[in-house]
Amino acid sequence: MKDFDLTKLVRANVAALKPYSSARDEFTTQGQEMIFLDANENPNNNGLNRYPDPQQCKVKEKLADVREVATKNILLGNGSDEVLDLIFRAFCVPGKDNVITLPPTYGMYKVLADINNIENREVYLDHEFEPDVTAILNKVDAHTKMIFLCSPNNPSGNSFDENKVSSILDNFKGLVVIDEAYIDFSEKESWLKKLEYFPNLIVTQTFSKAFGLAGIRLGALYASKEIISVLNKIKPPYNVNQQTQDKALKSLSNLEIIKIQIADLLEERLTLSKELLEVNFIAKIYKSDANFLLMEVDDANERYDELLAKGIVIRNRSNQPLCENCLRITIGTKEENNQLIKAFKELDNE
Ligand SMILES: *Cc1c(COP(=O)(O)O)cnc(C)c1O
């Protein structure tokens, strides 16, 4: 992307904003033991009596190592949901700007657009669940600030064709957000490697899926240091709490466990899809780069209810475009998957 001008994208009020400066922001350690009487905290140490590091330096250093990016290219938030909301608030003028999303996809982009009063222009994926680049670029106007690509995509499970994504990045002067919530289940390379080439690229990832830490609420956004600076101006000062930072740091120091869990899950994904292919009312199982499978059945509403009656909750996606009669199934533990297979086979024999 040549002629990319970030200053043209930032909302005027955000550009002019002087961020809240927390007591701890202004302080840099000189190496000596300090007495902290600056933030009106309770001085009695219980492990959590101090405000957390607003810049989460330790977590970022570890994450930078693991993802092979610089800390200045990272922003952390209270789940991906928060970092996605921050980009809406930094770049989109309510009632005036628009974004483009590609259904069927993650529902949160539209919810965030609605909350922020931003028009959400939908361009459906094609029948291969790939972006229709021409149609997307045709939807762009002077007020289009962002295009959201979810790759691997939820709920279809596929990763988008690299050339199509590059073509969008090359031809759109706004921001291209690639949501990589499921990247660790994919053999495809992360777009993080391309941050240097595309000043308009934002990549988001999460600790909620492969890292198994949905409960701590931690999302990461990677982008140019200029974009990160804009977002740092508007993020709440203490948006990632101490317990979350501690837990993330621990997890990032024990990557072997995560790698084993991912390998197990991929094996289960394969077993599950093989077994489910034997079920007659399952017409199709889509290839997945994620920790779930999308499948087409004879009657999604009926099958959904039947599984529910057997105590198994899955996701009915049949009201999504291109997902007629489709169910989405998260890969569970071996035991859970076996129960699911058993339930499906029982229904098949009824
Ligand atoms: C699950 C998921 C996320 C994770 O959101 P968090 O707020 O980090 O838990 C993000 N994007 C997609 C597409 C997801 O499916």
Image (cartoon, rainbow, N blue to C red):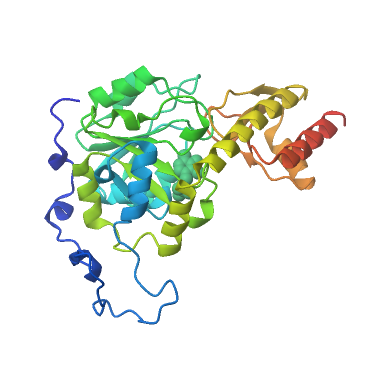
Image quarter where the C terminus lies is: top right
Relative horizontal placement of residue 184, taking residue 88 as reference (left or right):
right
Residue at (16%, 31%) from the top-left corner? 4
Q: Is residue 217 visible?
A: no
Residue 45 in the image: above or below residue 243 = below
Image quarter where the N terminus lies is: top left
Give residue 127's position: percent from left, percent from top: 50, 19
Q: Depth check: 92 or 199 in front?
A: 199
Residue 116 in the image: above or below residue 340 = below
Relative horizontal placement of residue 350, taking residue 211 as reference (left or right):
right
Q: Is residue 65 visible?
A: yes
Relative horizontal placement of residue 83, taking residue 232 as reference (left or right):
right
Give residue 200's position: percent from left, percent from top: 24, 33
Residue at (60%, 39%) from the top-left corner? 261
State the image quarter where residue 323 is shown.
top right
Residue at (76%, 48%) from the top-left corner? 311
Q: Depth check: 22 or 4 in front?
A: 22
What is the number of callouts on the image? 0
Give residue 292's position: percent from left, percent from top: 60, 34
Q: Depth check: 35 or 162 in front?
A: 35
